[in-house]
Image: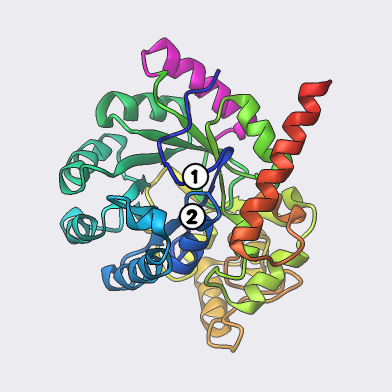
Amino acid sequence: MPPPTPTLPWTTTPLLINAPMANFAGGALASAVSLAGGLGMIGCLTSTSDLRRELDTAATALSSHTFFQETHSLPIGVGFLTFLLKLDDILPLVREYRPAVIWLFAAPHVDEYAAWSAALRTASPGSSVWIQTGSVDAALQICRTAAPDVLCMQGADAGGHGFEKGAGVISLVPETADALAREGFAHVPLVAAGGIVDGRGVAAALALGAAGVVMGTRFLASREVVVHARYQAAVLEARDGGQVTTRSRIFDELRGPNVWPEAYDGRSLVVRSYRDHVGGVGVEEIRRLYGEAVEEEDRGWKTGLQGRAAIWAGTGVGLVREVLGAGEIVERVRGEARDTLGRLARL
């Protein structure tokens, strides 16, 4: 039996979470997800002023709802890329807004989460610290050193950035759960991410031992996401997700030298920059062509896999077929998951 769902009193089971996609997941998306009974997340890249604006947007959207007025923290989460940010820069915002969840990801070294977790808990004692990782060994090390309230186990099917070497959630989640139980960390809930876009995937993740599910690609086709129209159109047209997406470091070389920690790469649609890379075109020429493309009106995001800018998407992209409001996505996926679980229980 999986650990209990994390204590987020406004949420409804099964727990659905939008991924804290930096530059995509803002206050409008996060508040819509939380208002629908999920956990809404804001992603922070590097700008604390941008983050403040998005936090204000979420706070305004949630302020008129009586339940949220009575809480002691803002009923959303904020995701931080620890390798890009300085802890001292974000602590004032955490103290001021007190998000319900603080989500940490992509530390250059796993042991660095311990200092971040301690400082953030001091700044906002009511916030839960969630840490995203992609291997059993890293999950154990994080539990030993950082005492996370929740672990997000990200499988290799995920869009965007994750461990270059990894497994899908179908083996990653149960193996992690077993390993944590053996080491005395069975109390740490796991949420699953990677390739999940509908209620069938949610039901499967719950059966594997997850206490909740994180979806990124599905929310790229929401009305509230911050995304270019061509980017969204490319996501909607994609089919056969395991073939039209791929993981590669070349996506992080387009703007200049890759700044991500060594363990990470990213999954994108198979755009022209990737195909050139596989075909032997040098990185300098790929960067030149990319630089020209992003000056165009579509900013290098084209449909038909003809663009040069990365279009981050997971292997579940082939199941994403329409744009809906984020709240409707949460409600629909939740209903599908409950129907699936009910049907399985009757077998």
Give how far across and how far down residue 292 sits, in percent: 55, 85
Give how far across and how far down residue 61 sits, in percent: 43, 68
Gap between marks 1 and 2 measured at Cα: 7 Å
Check contact, mark 1 vs mark 2: CB within 8 A: yes
The magenta stretch spans residue 211: no
**Residue extending furthest toward the top:** 182
Q: Which residue occupies the foreground of this view, 248 or 303?
A: 303
Instruction: Tell whether 50 sits left or right of 125.
Output: right
Label disc, if present, on residue 11 of the rendered structure: 1
Label disc, if present, on residue 77 of the rendered structure: none
Give how far across and how far down residue 56 sits, in percent: 33, 70
Q: Which residue occupies the foreground of this view, 347 or 322?
A: 347
Residue type pointed to by label 1: Thr
For residue 336, which quarter of the picture?
A: top right
- Tell me the residue at 70%/72% (across/down): 233
Residue type pointed to by label 2: Ser
Helix, strand, or loop for circle 2? helix
Helix, strand, or loop for circle 1? loop
The magenta stretch spans residue 178: yes
Q: Main secondary structure of the magenta part?
A: helix
Q: Is residue 77 visible?
A: no
Q: Which residue is mark 2?
A: 34
Give how far across and how far down residue 6 sits, in percent: 43, 34
Q: Quadrant of the C terminus?
A: top right
Q: Is residue 311 visible?
A: yes
Q: Is residue 137 above or below residue 7?
A: above
Q: Which residues are magenta?
A: 166-185
